Amino acid sequence: MVVSTAGQWVLLAYRIPRQPSTLRITIWRKLDRLGVARLGDGLVALPADARTREQLEWIAEEIGEVGGSSTLWLATAASLAQERAIAAEMQQARAAEYRAVAEQAEAAATARPGERSRVVKRLQAELRRIGRRDYFPPPEREAAQQTVRALAEVIVPGGTG
């Protein structure tokens, strides 16, 4: 994903009731699926664009519905170094996810054909999920995509799985 508003970030500052803990876990999981940068306890950030702002607005609304409080902010990092550090942290997290996909694809190369087909479908879906939260694509992205494509080629030569 290419961020349209360079230098702008949408921040969500939030507090969630401690009990029941399932509410906190649900919100944390939703934030993880978005690929947020955790700036501090109860403070997360995403590069600002219409989609990320809307997604954090939905989560902020949900936090209010469960008795918590939240505020959304549009912000710019105080320095380019700070912004780069946040982007690098987010990029490293996605790189680890892409490496895991590539490793799974490589491991599946020796599996039975039916199993390989299931793995390809699962890994293609995982690549799409990672891609939705990949704001600063690392080199591992292309490597993972190529490894999954190669596994698909083994199943259907000349095809994509």
Image (spheres, helix red, strand yellow):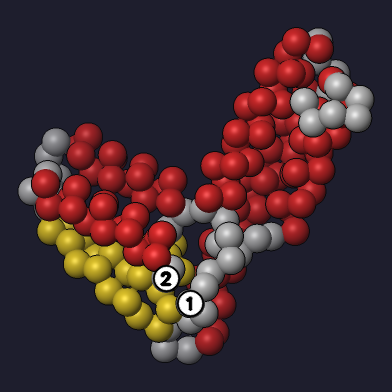
Q: Quadrant of residue 29 in the image?
A: top left
- Horizontal relation, residue 103 to residue 76: left or right: right
Tell me the SS state at disc 1: loop
Q: Is residue 100 visible?
A: yes
Tell me the SS state at disc 2: loop
Residue bearing mark 2: 48
Q: Quadrant of residue 42 in the image?
A: bottom left
Q: Is residue 26 above or below residue 117?
A: below
- Horizontal relation, residue 5 to residue 18: left or right: right
Disc number placed over residue 151 in the picture, else none: none
Residue in view at x 23 percent, y 43 percent: 24
- C-alpha distance separating marks 2 and 1: 6 Å
- Outermost right residue: 157
Residue bearing mark 1: 5
Q: Quadrant of residue 9 in the image?
A: bottom left
- Horizontal relation, residue 86 to residue 54: left or right: right
Q: Toward the viewer: 6 or 143? A: 6
Q: Quadrant of the N terminus?
A: bottom right
Nearer-N-terminus badge (2/1): 1
Q: Quadrant of the C terminus?
A: top right
* Dots 2, 1 in contact, CB < 8 A: yes
